[in-house]
Amino acid sequence: MPDHTIIESDKREFDPAEDDFDEFYFPRPEETDFGAIAEQAVSRRGFMQGTAAAGAAAFVMATTAMTPLSALANENRFGFKPIPANTLDTVTVPNGYNWHVVAAWGDPLWSKGAEFDDATKGTGESQETAFGDNTDGMALFVDGGRSILAVNNEYVNNKIFYASGKSAGPDDVRKSKAAHGVTVMEITEADGTWSIVKDSKYNRKITADTPMEITGPARGHELMKTKADPSGTTANGTWNNCGNGRTPWGTYLTCEENFNGYFSSSDANYQRSDELKRYGVNLEDRGYDWASVDERFDISKHPNEPNRFGYIVEIDPMDPTSTPKKRTALGRFKHENAEVALAANGRVVVYLGDDERGEYLYKFVSEGRYVEGGDNDDLLETGKLYAAKFNNSGAGQWLELNPETTGLKSQAEIAIHTRQAASAVKATTMDRPEWVAANPRKAEAYCCLTNNKNRGRKPNAGGDATPVGGPNPRAANNYGQIVRWVPDGGDHLSDTFAWDLYVVAGNPAVHSDANAGSKNVNKDNMFNSPDGLAFDANGMLWIQTDGNYSNAKGFAGMGNNQMLVGDPATGEIHRFMVGPKQCEITGITWSGDRKTLFVGVQHPGERGLGNSHFPGGGDTTPRSAIVAVSRDDGGLIG
Ligand code: FEO
Ligand code: CA
Ligand code: CA
Ligand code: CA
């Protein structure tokens, strides 16, 4: 996460002198009417088909959450003994499981490329042939027995990425651009160890400079035209690729999140439009310095360039010569991931979160229908876009974004200024929607609402109020929660749904109020800031965290960031993995035979060199890495 303000304010240890401390420990009671919300949560359990009364009760949010769910324990659904939290500088998995590193930032994809140089941390040239930095969302594709991994490389952290600690000159910018985007690489297993297949025909780097086609409603619109692209139909590159998606027709979806932080203005007096302000495009970038080399990042000279970023990009991982396609029909915002589900009639439904405090949750429904083996290439080019409205009653609806409902002039403008469109229909401002995951065994979907210190305190960037209530039940929310919804009629096509909270994270060892979390949180499984989310083939929910790892005060006992597994049916949650120091766990996919689970370890030691030496140990530079996890007995994992 490249937003330095977020890192500084959300991940630091609480300082008693800070406002955050007061907000955290003394939430204003009139805004935290948690009892009433809990009552509502109880009364709408009816939609949870097939859940026994005891199981339903387990979901009920309570003002005290000290009761473990031992009565509901069902080890068979988990297949592992949960592990305790820790603060070690390594990866920890349960007994009976093992892990190893598959690829780390700077590992070469081709034999002509240099190995990672710990002293210099690489050059522009070496980075252009190597795995990018800050591994994030990923998906593994199988082609005739070969395993092709598409992986996001979200951002770079100057403190780790450059030996000097900052970007200083053209080669640093070249290196930075080459460390962003998407890496496609073949991997293979030999003697139980997975590694990169150097020189594979599949290997490809998609970076901040790779030519892409703009598709959908915004294609060719005035707001998309620039000096370099007067037709508004092509854009160069993708960056800040956070979560991901995959389609049933075998393409990879990468999601442009904090795209704004790369733009700056050479004119200190440049007057930004309201639209640029809503998207957080500022006069200064976040330390990337790309405008010093590439003028298109200067908004005073190229004010439309930011309009060409903030999209879902569809990539064919099997064809390294294919042109990635920006899918503007899926809206422009700080995209987290793109969870694809199929409606009963074959329409493609994509759930999408906008990860910023008080922004929205979205759904796209394709106009065309998926046909197995048919021509599905452009299903994401045309369709309808909706924003979610959650009512306190436990019902909700998807509000269509079109010129009539939003007052915006055209579908193209809605595709470009999607946030303004969602504000216009009064969708529900959310606690930072991160990944959405759809249950493969049942028509329901889950979304991590990671945290929101502004809940009940400040409006979003568009001035929309962020009242406490509904799926965002706590003021100054520091721990996060996971909301889920069941579409009415059991079909993702439905415009209406029923929702509840699957888990409200918290610390029952420290708190006895709403900050203790829901009843399925206890001292043994507690965590904060759920972020990555995915279902396995068994219908179990894997939860990854990107939270406060201080292990102190309100976060005491939670340890490093981690990965847990939840049972949707019982609400039970067990900790499966703990990451190294100062990392985030993000990105998850499985091998074709489901015997290996691939997990991303992002930004170990993010506060600066010396804070972690994962994965190399000794005095080495901390490097984001993908790890492979498998069972000692060779069984299936998820
Ligand atoms: Fe890149 Fe919202 O996480
Ligand atoms: Ca991150
Ligand atoms: Ca994330
Ligand atoms: Ca996050």
Image: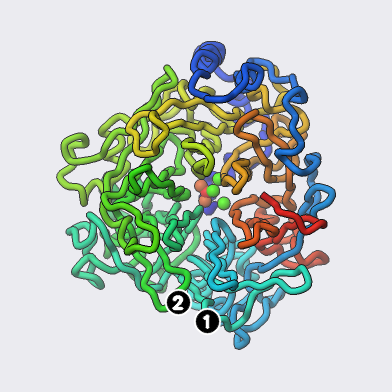
- Do callouts 1 and 2 mark residues in contact (Cβ within 8 Å)? yes
State the image quarter where residue 224 is shown: bottom left
Q: Amino acid at mark 1?
A: Lys
Question: Residue 60 lies in what quarter of the image?
Answer: top right
For residue 615, say whether it is visible. Answer: yes
Q: Nearer the viewer, residue 222 or 136?
A: 136
Identify the residue at image location x=51%, y=53%: 243
Task: Identify the amino acid type marked 2.
Answer: Pro
| Residue under the point 24% across and 46% down | 414
* Residue 242 position in % (x across, y down): 50, 54
Query: Is residue 249 depicted above or below 481 in this figure?
Result: below
Q: Is residue 565 left or right of residue 364?
A: right
- Pick the residue in front: 341 or 202: 341
Q: Is residue 111 left or right of residue 289?
A: right
The CA distance from mark 1 to mark 2 is 8 Å
Total marks shown come to: 2
Q: Residue at x 19, y 58 (%)?
A: 221
In the rendered view, would you say 230 is above or below 520?
below
Residue on which the image places disc 2 = 320
Residue on which the image places disc 1: 201
**Label 1 vs 2, first from the N-terminus:** 1
**Residue 616, disc:** none
Q: Quadrant of residue 84?
A: top right
**Residue 603 visible in image:** no
Q: Residue furthest bottom?
A: 112
The secondary element bearing badge 2 is classed as loop
| Ligand 4 picture quarter | top right
Query: What kind of element bears circle 1?
Result: loop
Image x and y of residue 518, in percent = 63, 23
Residue 90, position as x, y percentages in the image? 78, 55
